[in-house]
Image: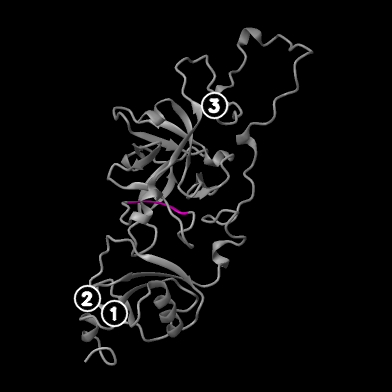
Amino acid sequence: MELFAQAKAVRLKSHHDKFLYADEDEVHVTQDRNGSSSNARWTVEQVPHSPGVLRLRSRYGRYLTASNEPFLLGMTGRKVLQTAPARPDSSVEWEPVRDGFQARLKTRYGHFLRANGGLPPWRNSVTHDVPHRTATQDWVLWDVEIVQVLTPGPDRADSAPASMPASPPAPELRKPPPPHAAHHRPSKSYAAPPPPLEHEAPPGPRLSKLESSDSFSAPLHKVEGRAIHYHIADDMGNVDDDTEGHSFIFNGSNLEELTHKLQEETNLDGIIICTRSPINGKLTPLRLQLPPNNAAMHIVLVRESSKVAKTFPWPYGS
């Protein structure tokens, strides 16, 4: 794809005006507004014998990877990580697909790099998925900002585009003096030594892995409430797992409050909150207390007037 054809390093900006960011733990990938950080800079590597396919390498030398690990149980999105495989395989290969002035980054298996929004734990997370809802189609679109141009000549320094501030020269481009010139002294008119390169500065303090500094002032584990992830079943109690579910943060403490909150979220009256067996998928109405310690919940909503509700024990069915 021509957007990457002459790029040696790029920044990728999401629909949420945040940059694809390699976390300091050298494992996770998030979104962050700090585009000036070298953590938002990705080196482009063309995949040999695969025209149009590339790899993206973070400042830590690790590749942007489409893993098989689910981001949340019961959801379709899978984690995007930084990895350093001994032999790079298809999980670190991305095919850019142009969409106007933007690009979608497709895995070799048809998923797309996706910048998530909404409430934690989705906020600022990055997954790979197939977008199902029209409202989230833009979440797989990325602005490609070239920060270093690939030049054919070995003696030419790479340069930044005119529309962006010039970056300090990358370490690999600083050539050592030739051996025969080692005895020469620099002229007294030589300017002061250049400032330290960007990569030498230790990363500044950041907040939570999935939250940028403009969103929250506390880490994720201090956020009050619990995450509620839910699907709405059809009349027979079936749930389309290929359809993206919904999520929100619930600050209540009992089932009655949760029911009321879900009625507000869905604009539905007369709903039954159910859990689904991971073994056979059977729905069971939730009647006891909510799980302790604000543990996240994955639930299914059933209408009281539905056919499946009539199969539940009293007081819902017959």
Q: Earlier in the sequence, mark 3 or mark 1?
A: 3
Q: Earlier in the sequence, mark 2 or mark 1?
A: 2
Q: Tag 2: residue type?
A: Asp
Q: CA distance from mark 3 to mark 1?
A: 58 Å
Residue at 38% in and 39% down: 103
Q: Crowding near pointer 2: few (<14 within 10 Å), some, many (20+)?
A: some
Q: Is residue 316 above or below residue 134?
A: below
Which mark, by number, is residue 303?
Answer: 1
Is disc 2 in contact with disc 1, using a CB cutoff of under 8 Å? yes
Q: Tag 1: residue type?
A: Arg
Which mark, by number, is residue 16?
Answer: none
Q: CA distance from mark 2 to mark 1?
A: 8 Å
Find disc 3 in the rendering and name its residue: 160
Q: Is residue 70 above or below residue 309?
A: above
Which mark, by number, is residue 235?
Answer: 2
**Disc 2, SS:** loop
> Any magenta on residue 127?
yes
Number of numbered markers: 3
Q: Crowding near pointer 1: few (<14 within 10 Å), some, many (20+)?
A: some
